[in-house]
Amino acid sequence: MFSIIQAAGWPIWPLIICSVLGLALVIERFISLKSSKIMPPKLLDEAIMVSRNGIPGPDVVTQLEQNSVLGSVLASGFRTFNSNPRASEDDLRASLEGAGRQAAAKLQRYLGALATIASAAPLLGLLGTVIGMIEIFGSQASEGAGVVPGVGNPGQLAHGISIALYNTAFGLIVAIPALIFWRYFRARVDDYLLGMELAAERFTRHLLSLRRTPL
């Protein structure tokens, strides 16, 4: 492996950094986007059940908020009525929408960096290719004018070709998985956001029904 890095020359080092960073981001997103941390399956039903007889106290709300991303959204609805039992429907929806925007930002964290790696890696590979081509033409020019192409310095010619090919290949090796994982995580985040939107709407109807009864 080290011999390949040596043959590819210095242009491959930015690609190596991108590959390490991309791998770290993929691992982090896999851990952070687990359903247990975002949308536990029974959390909405439990939140509705615990509030059937009224809005729960601050301790229960804090525990719900720390449970998951969806829990923080639902807790914002409880906090609205805890701070103002006569809060209007618009106030409630504004609170849930604000919490939803914060949740969306949390879910989309680092996806932009992963997309940047997927876009930049082929360009870095192309840069290495151009540098390799420059070395190839430099090996021809070093022999003087009028030399037939391909008959220049063989060592420098081979080095230029290796830089061009290795960097092109490595750029694609980094970019393709980064693009695949970026699209996968984007689809996963979109599914979570849709699920949270539906859950928030159901939770809003439940909380509004509580306002019709004495709190």
Image (cartoon, rainbow, N blue to C red):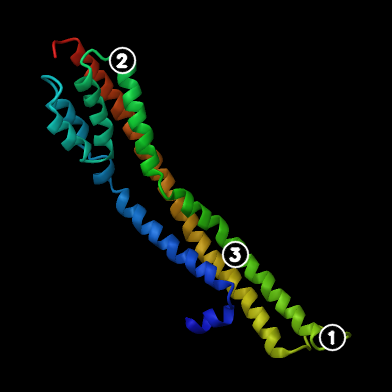
Which one is nearer the viewer's eye here, 106 or 169?
106
Q: Position of residue 126 (x, y in %)?
A: 64, 65
Report which residue position mark 2 lands on: 89
Occupied quadrant, residue 40: top left
Which one is nearer the viewer's eye here, 94 or 192?
94
User: Which numbered tag is attached to residue 148?
Assistant: 1
Which one is nearer the viewer's eye here, 188 or 144?
144
> Residue drawn at (52%, 54%), measured in percent from left and top?
116
166 displayed left or right of 63: right
Occupied quadrant, residue 51: top left
Vertical arrangement, residue 148 with respect to residue 172, above or below: below
> Residue drawn at (46%, 51%), measured in percent from left and top?
182
168 displayed left or right of 53: right
User: Which numbered tag is attached to residue 124?
Assistant: 3
> Residue drawn at (67%, 85%), measured in percent from left and top?
158
Q: Position of residue 60 (x, y in %)?
A: 13, 32
Q: Amino acid at mark 1?
A: Val
Q: Secondary structure at mark 1?
A: loop
Which of pointers 2 and 1 indicates the residue nearer the eye?
2
Furthest toward the right, the residue is: 146
Q: Position of residue 10 (x, y in %)?
A: 58, 76
- Please report contact status of discs 1 and 3: CB closer than 8 Å, yes or no: no
Q: CA distance from mark 2 to mark 1?
A: 81 Å
- In the picture, which quadrant includes the C terminus? top left
